[in-house]
């Protein structure tokens, strides 16, 4: 497989600084070498560059860094569209606002190729606020709503070339959902496998069902991995810690099942804040999870379960 690494050193969408260093930490933790060791051709495109700022005014006074995030969305949409032409793009965040751009870029690519795009959102949060409903004003809380065409972004974020159909989105690992997001997720028809569902059924059957849906539709699959999907005990380098996250073994299992499926066509690694890490352990874990997603196995052949 050919992988294109795209740096997205963005921290304007987060409530605290540090995610700008995310791409450096992932490179330092050996991402490129880990993927090459698995036999992949890796092209490191270096960092994307923000588009020009436009003055923007919005009635929601809580919004932070709206011009910056809008400009990054424009730039990353283009980078994602280009990088997905002939390779699997891996976007190194940066806070989760980068997914407004990465998702809209791969959605355009999928639409042009006539393939349905599915999204697996691995996160403690759904990031399904609009510019009107966010209370914190941190724009890493809006990318999934934007990319799936929820109203209120017109004139602020770039126009969407193609939206992600909400019914093709699966959020996985949620355990912190704001009231406005809860009703919007349900109304839009997004699949929610929250932590309660994972505890009750186990990660594997839920993943298996979703993978089967993507395969049946001959879909493309974008995976967006927020560090706070993982339990803070194994992944401390995140500004929005929520207790009760995915375990080391659940997270690797999800990645291995995705790898076996052969369906994943693009990936975001987001919300890594190296300033909060402990000797690089979170960055190293993300590299190991990415390696599992791209074929690293305990034994030579996967112990297939489906
Ligand atoms: N990508 C993230 N870490 N998002 C956290 C968002 C938290 C909260 N829902 C907010 O809007 O502020
Ligand atoms: Mn997130
Ligand atoms: Mn999150």
Image (cartoon, rainbow, N blue to C red):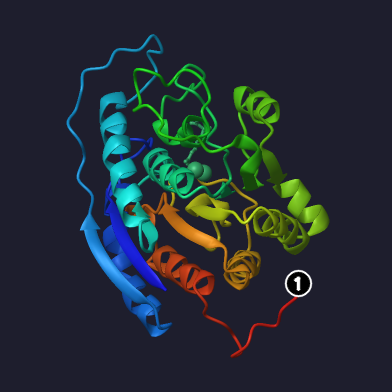
Q: Hey, which quadrant is residue 253 in on the image?
A: bottom right
Looking at this rendering, what residue extends furthest in the bottom direction?
Answer: 300
Query: In the image, residue 176 lies at what x, y percent?
Result: 62, 38
Q: Residue at x 51, y 28 (%)?
A: 149
Q: How many marks?
A: 1
- Label 1 neighbour load within 10 Å: few <14, some 14-19, many 20+: few
Q: Determine whether 27 is above or below 213 in the image.
A: below
Q: Determine whether 51 is above or below 193 in the image.
A: above
Callout 1: helix, strand or loop?
A: loop
Residue 224 vs residue 64: left or right?
right
Answer yes or no: is residue 235 visible: no
Q: Nearest the camera: 60 or 50?
A: 50
Looking at this rendering, what residue extends furthest in the left direction?
Answer: 52
Answer yes or no: is residue 217 visible: yes
Q: Determine whether 31 is above or below 273 in the image.
A: below
In the rendered image, the quadrant that contains the N terminus is bottom left
Query: In the image, residue 165 lies at what x, y percent?
Result: 58, 37
| Pointer 1 residue | 306
Q: Any atom of ligand 2 within 8 Å of the CB at mark 1?
A: no
Residue 155 vs residue 150: left or right?
left
Looking at this rendering, what residue extends furthest in the top direction?
Answer: 59
In the rendered image, the quadrant that contains the C terminus is bottom right
Residue 141 vs residue 230: left or right?
left
Q: Residue at x 68, y 24 (%)?
A: 183
Looking at this rendering, what residue extends furthest in the right direction?
Answer: 200
Q: Nearest the camera: 227 or 210?
A: 210
């Amino acid at each position: 497989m050919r992988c294109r690494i795209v740096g997205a050193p963005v921290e304007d969408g987060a409530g605290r600084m540090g995610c700008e260093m995310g791409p450096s930490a992932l490179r330092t933790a050996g991402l490129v070498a880990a993927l090459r060791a698995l036999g992949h051709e890796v092209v490191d495109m270096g960092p994307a560059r923000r588009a020009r700022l436009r003055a923007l005014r919005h009635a929601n006074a809580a919004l932070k860094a709206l011009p910056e995030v809008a400009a990054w969305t424009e730039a990353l949409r283009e980078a994602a569209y280009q990088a997905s032409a002939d390779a699997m793009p891996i976007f190194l965040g940066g806070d989760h606002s980068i997914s407004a751009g990465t998702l809209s870029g791969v959605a355009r690519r999928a639409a042009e190729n006539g393939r349905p795009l599915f999204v697996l959102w691995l996160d403690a949060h759904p990031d399904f606020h609009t510019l009107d409903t966010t209370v914190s004003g941190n724009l890493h809380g809006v990318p999934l709503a934007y990319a799936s065409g929820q109203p209120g972004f017109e004139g602020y974020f770039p126009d969407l070339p193609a939206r992600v159909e909400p019914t093709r989105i699966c959020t996985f690992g949620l355990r912190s959902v704001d009231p406005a997001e809860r009703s919007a997720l349900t109304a839009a028809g997004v699949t929610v496998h929250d932590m309660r569902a994972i505890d009750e059924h186990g990660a594997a059957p839920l993943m298996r069902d979703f993978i089967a849906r993507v395969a049946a539709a001959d879909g493309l699959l974008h995976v967006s991995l927020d560090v706070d999907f993982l339990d803070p005990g194994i992944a401390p380098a995140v500004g929005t810690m929520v207790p009760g996250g995915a375990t080391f073994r659940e997270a690797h299992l999800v990645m291995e099942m995705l790898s076996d499926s052969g369906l994943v066509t693009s990936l975001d690694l987001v919300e890594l804040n190296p300033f909060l890490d402990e000797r690089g352990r979170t960055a190293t874990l993300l590299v190991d999870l990415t390696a599992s997603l791209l074929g690293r196995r305990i034994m030579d052949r996967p112990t297939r379960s489906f």
